[in-house]
Image (cartoon, rainbow, N blue to C red):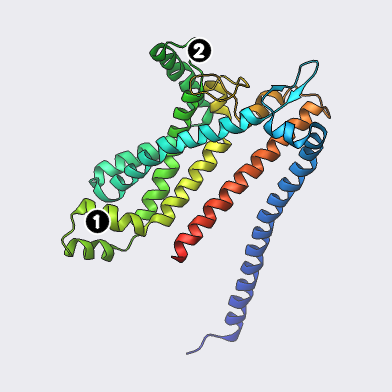
Amino acid sequence: MSEPKPQKRQFRAMEEVMKILFLVCGMISVGFVLFISIYLIISGLPAIMTIGPIEFLFGTTWASTASEPQFGILPFILTSIYGTAGAIIIGVPVGFLAAVFLAKVAPPKVAAVIRTAVDLLAGIPSVVYGLIGMMVLVPAVRELFGLPDGASLFCAIIVLAIMILPTIVSVSETALKAVPPEYEEASLALGATEIETYMRVSVPAAKSGIASAVVMGIGRAIGEAMAIIMVAGNVANMPSLFSSVRFLTTAITSEMSYAAVGSLQQQALFSIGLVLFLFIMIINVLLNTLLKGNREK
């Protein structure tokens, strides 16, 4: 027996309403991105034009409050690149192997305990990471390497690596669990060991999800400010592993509160935000292009 026509009309009306709702939500998201982009361009370009693009991007001295101010952000750019790269080099292998262990190797009870710990790690506020790093990691590095001050790029890399672990573990584990069991069963039937199956069958099948986890980890590392400002020393030096440094994010955080409204200093800080925004967009576009290429293969 067919459904009554009024009920069909209600279902169709509800579908149309939901389609419109989804469209509105999508447009709101796009609108926020456009608003942020336009605002940063309008606020950041004047300082870049005043200072000069070459001097601003490739200058090695930042002295925004000097009698003759200089606004070179190359130390901030290099520090952000080195810090993010270091965190990825440490955090990705640890997070990836932990995800393989949780998804394929660990007994259910052990996996449940570790998964709970990972979830708790994800919920810890950034300032707590920074506080523990400042009170424990920085003094330990100072004593271990005989440094006058332990606050350094090295400490920032360690803290960032720990902070991106939950994202990499959770997303990678989900991707590995989504691999059809038939793939692994076929591999085992052909005589491969369990570890060979996991690393040569399951991991390649889940590479898109694992790569997405890395992308999210990079975004978390680049955008972090509160924890980093507490362990990196916040000094505008050219980056060195055991010297105090300042990231793009911490440069904005540390000076925006006292920069005079409408001053060149404040405009330069907006310009740093614009550079950071473009930096993140370029990385996302490149990584997403690589992922798309891998999927097409």
254 in relation to 287, above or below: above
User: As drawn, is 208 to the left or to the right of 63?
Assistant: left
Q: Where is residue 25 in the image (x, y as percent from the top left)?
A: 65, 58
At x 27%, y 53%, the residue is 198
Picture mark count:
2
Query: Which residue reaches farthest left?
Result: 191
Residue 85 falls left or right of residue 66: left
Using the rendered view, name the quadrant where residue 29 is placed: bottom right
The image quadrant that residue 24 belongs to is bottom right
Q: Position of residue 67 (x, y in %)?
A: 80, 15
Q: What element carries label 1?
A: helix
For the C terminus, the quadrant is bottom left
- Who's the residue at 57% across and 28% down the image? 226
Residue, disc 1: 197
Three-letter code, disc 2: Asp
Q: Between residues 164 and 70, which one lies in front from this camera angle? A: 70
Count residues near mark 1 (Cα–Cα under 10 Å), then give few for <14, some for 14-19, many for 20+.
some
**Residue 167: quadrant of the picture:** top left
Callout 2: 10 Å neighbours few (<14), some, many (20+)? some
- Please report the residue visible at 61 percent of the width from the left and 77 percent of the height from the top: 12
Give the mark nearer the N terminus: 1 vs 2.
2
Position above or below: 292 against 230: below
Of the pair 112 and 216, the residue shown nearer to us: 216
Which kind of residue does numbered mark 1 sit on?
Answer: Thr
Toward the viewer: 27 or 294?
A: 294
Q: Horizontal and vertical percent for residue 241?
A: 49, 23
- Residue 163 visible somewhere in the drawing: no
Q: Spatial distance from mark 1 to mark 2, Cα to Cα? A: 47 Å
Is residue 296 visible in the rendered image? The answer is: yes
Tell me the residue that label 2 is attached to. 149
Q: Where is residue 124 in the image (x, y as percent from the top left)?
A: 47, 32
Q: Give the camera-side residue of 15 and 100.
A: 100
